[in-house]
Image: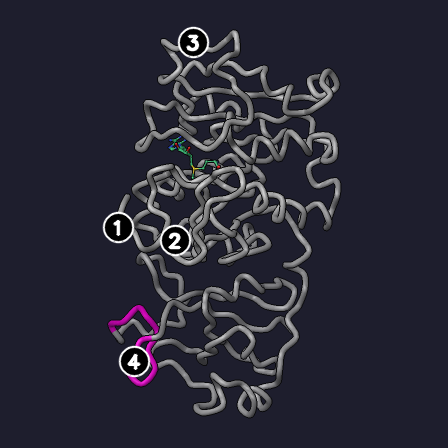
Amino acid sequence: MAGNKNLNSAARAKNDEFYTQYDDIQRELNCYYLYDENFLRGKTVLLPCDDPQWSNFTKFFALNFTRYGLKKLISTGYAADKKKFVYKPMKNLFDDNDAPQFNPTIDAAHGRIYTLDADDIAKVDYPLDALTNWRYLDGDGDFRSEEVKRLRDEADVIITNPPFSMFREFLAWIVDAGKQFLIIGNINCITYKEVFPLIMQNKIWLGNGMGRWISGFIVPDDYELYGTEARVDERGNRIVATNQCLWLTNLDHGKRHEPLNLMTYAECERFHPKVRDTSFQRYDNYDAIEVPATDAIPKDFGGVMGVPITFLDKYCPEQFEIVGATESEGAGFSNGLWHDDSQYRQATIGGKKVYKRLFIRHRR
Ligand SMILES: C[S@@+](CC[C@H](N)C(=O)[O-])C[C@H]1O[C@@H](n2cnc3c(N)ncnc32)[C@H](O)[C@@H]1O
């Protein structure tokens, strides 16, 4: 992957082997726990697409099994033979190649499954020691296989950083089964036709952070480290930073119920640096005013406002209603706000294109 300057969607689409850091998992999960410490109590959590022998998801949930009151933890990994990029991964949680069940003749072709329940945890002093009780899956661990689908159906909650190249299919796999979930995706997924309608209906939402909230991903040994925030951590893991990712979920958390503190229309016109020179402008081709930044949303405007998609990071469904988005993927997102004779899907002002927008209005 030499030559990459960005952890952009193209690079990520080619390489699914980006691993999540422990701190990022902990920071996100803590927010749900602080909001409701019983949010996973008595539940079966499935971590698919997870390479459990070195995954920080598996490590985090094994270490927090008792604190979270889990009923069962299931973690599955994808066969090495099926991965597009195979590399010696980051440091293993345990040296499982010495395990009696390790079989070099089938190892590369089969996925693995690790399960933990309260009895397993009770038998060991340190929760990770209970994870030595793994076995091979019958198949390769593909999330689309009948074998892993059965695990999905058994689970209450599905948590992972899925393969970037299969994000849409993976989300559909969860939604079709009506499961609770918490997954990592690219910011652009907000305007996918499989995602935005669910966000608009408040069936799914952003987790606690996007962009720099996820501080980076662990990458293969031969992956070029680029950018000022790329680093090697104290355990020797190579980390590439990105501001392009977010957590997507249907688990409730406190941040989404915190309303924004906003200025009035007149105050924005007077004080907001992105509004004071031009005031609020109307789009040529959508029935809405342009609000160029989330903190410039006027608190006393009754009509429809176009806002950057990063607004979702601050979206409180008690404060705002999402009424649409600029057209994307021919999906009819604009809900009648678009003048389709304009030819442009993107919103324009004075003929000049504006980046993707969501359309919102205040709830009164
Ligand atoms: C982005 S990585 C994340 C791994 C781990 N969940 C983490 O966050 O550290 C996605 C993983 O999914 C695996 N994968 C790719 N295609 C898959 C499939 N069809 N079924 C299951 N896993 C797959 C990749 O090999 C990779 O290990």
Mark 4–mark 1 distance (CA, rounded to whole Å): 33 Å
Q: Which mark is residue 3?
A: 1
Q: Which residue: 55% across, 22% down?
A: 94
Q: Nearer the viewer, mark 3 or mark 1?
A: 1
Nearest the eye: 214 or 144: 214
Question: Can you identify the residue that label 4 sits on?
Answer: 352
Question: Can you identify the residue that label 2 sits on?
Answer: 192
In what quadrant of the picture does the C terminus appear? bottom right
Majority secondary structure of magenta residues: loop
| Kind of residue at disc 4 | Lys
Question: Can you identify the residue that label 3 sits on?
Answer: 103
The answer to whether residue 352 is magenta is: yes
Mark 4–mark 2 distance (CA, rounded to whole Å): 24 Å
Q: Which residue: 67% across, 50% down?
A: 31
Left or right: where does residue 4 sit relative to residue 145? left
Ligand 1 is found in which quarter of the picture? Answer: top left
Question: Image height check: is 237 above or below 317?
Answer: above
Left or right: where does residue 8 sit relative to residue 69? left
| Kind of residue at disc 1 | Gly
Left or right: where does residue 215 sit relative to residue 354? right
Question: Image height check: is 214 above or below 332?
Answer: above
Answer with mark 3 or mark 1, whichever residue precedes in sequence. 1
Q: Secondary structure at mark 1?
A: loop
| Kind of residue at disc 3 | Asn
Q: Nearer the viewer, mark 1 or mark 2?
A: 1
